Amino acid sequence: MILRRLSTALRKQDWFTVAVETLIVMFGVFLGLQVNNWNEARFERADTQNVLERLERDFEVQLTLTNRGIGQQVLVLEATSRLITGIRTGDLDEQTLNEDLALVDSVSTFPGPSAAFQELVSTGRMNLIANGDLRDELYEFDSSITFGREIFSGSFTAPVDELARVLSRAKTLVAPGTPSETFAQIGAVETVDHTVLLEDPEIHIALQNAYLVQDNYHLFLIRYRNQIKDILELLAEERERAP
């Protein structure tokens, strides 16, 4: 319709009509582009909010698991320390001995990577995170988790495995013949050979080596917790700023 009027105006050299019709066409194109931009911006805002919410949920779960792991690791360190001290002095703490022996050759679970962050990276949508500090923290946390898991899944934890091997000489595990119903039942100690525990030098050495690994593990968990808290704080700020 507009093109027909424009063509007629051109034949008649009606320049005023030509100008008006041309402006109408240009305005229509501009309006269409503007509406498209508005829709894209609206979808991007919604996508950004969804991403921030998913990241926040991920790291809240990570914080809970990491705090639990730190608490567990503190118990492991305390148990290992009691055994080292008891062997050195020849005075074992009988009240906690069985529980300590069941606990010392274990380590807590590491926090895992953020699924939401990895999805953002794999789909090339990190541009949705406007805060450069938040982006840097997310990348740093992911690298730290990868590094920590590589270390503690390799030879670094060998002293803990060695401790489990030498301690088997001094303890007899509970073996009821039925599957355990709780994690606390796994590895429960029934009897302890005090003579072997006090006089076998390999056990004392293994306990000290394992303590070093457990202490390092605890420090890694503390670092992860601090990183997670920083990320959650930045996420909260970013959600407040997001339109």
Image (tube, rainbow, N blue to C red):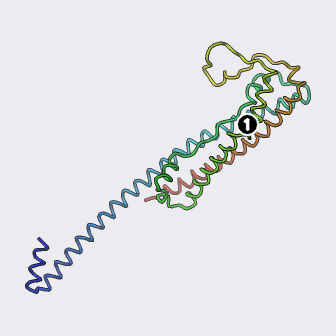
Between residue 68 and residue 122, name the one nearer to us.
122
Query: Which quadrant is the C terminus positioned in?
Result: bottom left
- The residue at 81%/37% (across/down) is 209
Between residue 237 and residue 63, name the one nearer to us.
63
Q: Is residue 152 left or right of residue 126?
A: right
- Whether residue 14 is situated above or below residue 53 in the rendered picture: below
- How many numbered tags mark residues here? 1
Q: Quadrant of residue 181?
A: top right
In this view, the residue farthest toward the front is 155
Looking at the rendered structure, the secondary structure element under dot 1 is helix
- Whether residue 227 is situated above or below residue 202 in the rendered picture: below
Crowdedness near tag 1: few (<14), some (14–19) or many (≥20) residues, C-alpha within 10 Å: some
Q: Amino acid at mark 1?
A: Val
Q: Position of residue 50 (x, y in %)?
A: 44, 50
Q: Position of residue 169 (x, y in %)?
A: 81, 21
Residue under circle 1? 74
- The residue at 73%/38% (across/down) is 157
Q: Position of residue 241 (x, y in %)?
A: 48, 59
- Whether residue 206 is situated above or below residue 60 in the rendered picture: above
- The residue at 76%/41% (across/down) is 215
Query: Which quadrant is the N terminus positioned in?
Result: bottom left
In this view, the residue farthest toward the top is 177
Q: Is residue 177 left or right of residue 199?
A: left
Q: Quadrant of residue 176?
A: top right
- The residue at 73%/18% (across/down) is 173
